[in-house]
């Protein structure tokens, strides 16, 4: 099930990246199939590698710098890690694509780096806000559960203190009933047995 979710999210990221790239950087690629296929291969590779890499970095940072411990520090380190990783990957992939396939990224390399970093920071900010809110909600739920358990514990302690006193008073009342009215004493014992 998890594998299927990873595959679907990866495909969606690739498709989203291709559409965004066509709309922003290469609208003319839609009218030339060789350019479109090349652009689809390159941009989907870029987006998938960037998304999954930034996701991996975020998971590592979540373990090392928990959101609830110091959210400002976690956010700053996350943004810095995302920008450094994104810049490095774009430069490396551009170099590899030019070396292997001879496809030059052209003069748009700096614009691509800037655009990818802006998108990465926006996505990171959204995901960070989501993670922080989920962590905050989980903390509030845990706190409410602890508060509820504490109230239940206090109730049980109070009940255990009241029970012996109630039992003593009931037995005292029963003692006087046994001498006065034995039938009423039997009813009283039956009612008392239902309480305990």
Image (cartoon, rainbow, N blue to C red):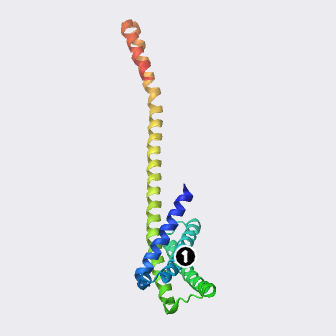
- Using the image as rendered, state which of residue 25 and residue 89 is in the foreground: 25
The quadrant of the rendering that contains the C terminus is top left
Which residue of the protein is positioned furthest toward the bottom in this rendering? 107
Look at the image and tell me whether residue 143 can be seen. yes
User: Regarding mark 1 in the picture, which secondary structure is present there?
Assistant: helix
The quadrant of the rendering that contains the N terminus is bottom right
| Residue at point 54%, 80% (across, down) | 86
The image position of residue 85, as x and y in percent, is 57, 79
Residue 54 appears in which quarter of the rendering?
bottom right
Q: Residues within 10 Å of mark 1 (few under 14, many from 20)?
A: some
Residue 186 appears in which quarter of the rendering?
top left
Position above or below: 167 against 148:
above
Question: Disc 1 designates what residue?
Answer: 45
The image position of residue 157, as x and y in percent, is 48, 36
- Using the image as rendered, state which of residue 154 and residue 83 is in the foreground: 83
Look at the image and tell me whether residue 67 can be seen. no
| Residue at point 43%, 58% (across, down) | 137
Position above or below: 156 against 123:
above
């Amino acid at each position: 099930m998890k594998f299927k979710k990873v595959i679907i999210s990866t495909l969606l990221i690739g498709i989203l990246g291709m559409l965004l790239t066509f709309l922003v950087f290469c609208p003319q690629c839609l009218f030339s199939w060789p350019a479109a296929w090349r652009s689809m291969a390159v941009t989907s590779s870029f987006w998938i590698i960037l998304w999954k890499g930034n996701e991996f970095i975020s998971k590592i940072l979540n373990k090392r710098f928990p959101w609830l411990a110091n959210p400002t520090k976690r956010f700053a380190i996350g943004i810095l890690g995302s920008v450094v990783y994104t810049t490095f990957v774009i430069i490396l992939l551009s170099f590899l694509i030019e070396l292997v396939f001879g496809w030059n990224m052209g003069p748009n390399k700096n614009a691509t780096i800037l655009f990818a970093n802006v998108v990465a920071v926006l996505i990171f900010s959204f995901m960070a806000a989501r993670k922080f809110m989920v962590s905050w909600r989980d903390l509030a739920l845990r706190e409410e559960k602890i508060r509820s358990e504490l109230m239940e514990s206090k109730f049980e302690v109070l009940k255990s203190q009241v029970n012996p006193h109630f039992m003593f008073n009931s037995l005292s009342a029963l003692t006087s009933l046994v001498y006065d009215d034995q039938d009423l004493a039997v009813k009283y014992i039956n009612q008392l047995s239902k309480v305990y």
